[in-house]
Image (spheres, rainbow, N blue to C red):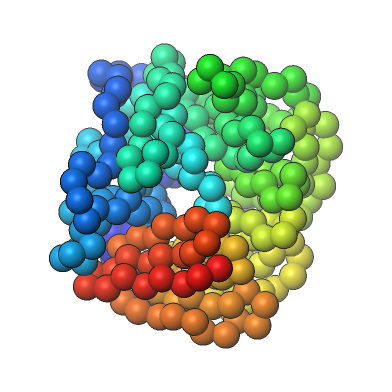
Amino acid sequence: MKKLLFLLFILLLFISGCDERAGVKSEALGCSGEDCKLVYDGVQYLTYNEKSKSSTGKVDVTENEFQYRLPGNDEYVTSGNSMTNEFTILKRENERLEPVYEHDNDKEAIFPVAVMDEKYIFAIMEYAEDQQVFKGLFKLTEKNKLEKLKTEDNEMTRKIFGVGISSDDQFFVLLNEDGKQNVYHTDLSLSSFDLVAEDVSQNLSAHEGDVCYMKEGTFFCGDKKIKKLEDGTVFAWALGNDILEVNDTGKFEVRDFKDQKLLESGNQFIGFDSDSSKLTIYSDGDVTELAK
């Protein structure tokens, strides 16, 4: 778990990119036997054995390979390499991630940013010559193709960082401005940008139409302070009516969103899974389930 801070640092290396290219992946990732669950630790998917209550490894052991998902919805995720890109869109089928689209540009990365009108929306970022360039928003069609949306091209869109979230058909994105990551409310046409907060963490989630984020040791949703974060917090997500908080030692807490009442806590966090009915926390030696 202590490696999470290092992994977060590695994710930032996407702003430099690389021209090197390796083979395209086409195999499914995830579980292949019984008593296996697919879990997410914040930067990548792992498999977990429910009998031994322990991690059985990464779904992809390729060096610098990470997966990207929306905290409240992982029907589709993307997987790519921080050195070679090689991005793939994967569809979750129970405890497996099945490839449905393989990107053919090794200078571009694909990130899930929203679910709007029941369509998955992705941002494509180009990385070349130590720069990142926003290439547009794309929806995944029923034929598993990426179709570019018609969007504005202006000073604001050129600052988009490739991180976004949606909630109740409200869409939010991060912009890189003067070395800070600022979150804005926008729309799929990117025609207007309303500042929500400045200098926030990339760790976005959403709750009842608001974007949730970490800033200065506090967890916010919209402009409202929800709770003070514990020392060393690496991740904090709004997941339905719960807040999951994980620190750099592997300690985790689950609190009720409305009154921050402590519901569960533990150590040696490995990952989580979340669906419409429950939140499940997987740790070394224990599995915790909370009904939503």
- State the residue at coordinates (63%, 40%): 114
- Using the image, determine if residue 281 lies above or below residue 155: below
Residue 248: give x, y in percent of width and height.
Answer: 36, 69
**In-image side of 82 versus 124 (left or right):** left
Residue 109: give x, y in percent of width and height.
Answer: 47, 28
Kindly give the residue lying farthest to the top in the view shown. Answer: 104
- State the residue at coordinates (29%, 31%): 28
User: Is there any visible trace of residue 42 in the rendered image?
Assistant: yes
Which quarter of the rendering shows the C terminus? bottom right
Residue 194: give x, y in percent of width and height.
Answer: 82, 47
- Using the image, determine if residue 271 lies above or below residue 89: below
Residues 273 and 23: in front is 273
User: Is there any visible trace of residue 13 in the rendered image?
Assistant: no
Number of labelled discs? 0
Residue 198: give x, y in percent of width and height.
Answer: 70, 56
- State the residue at coordinates (78%, 24%): 152
- Using the image, determine if residue 7 lies above or below residue 241: above
Residues 161 and 144: in front is 144
Residues 151 and 31: in front is 31
**In-image side of 58 versus 264 (left or right):** left
Which quarter of the rendering shows the N terminus? bottom left
- State the residue at coordinates (49%, 82%): 263
Query: Quadrant of the rendered structure where residue 27 is?
Result: top left
Query: Quadrant of the rendered structure where residue 82 is?
Result: top left
Kindly give the residue lying farthest to the left in the view shown. Answer: 52
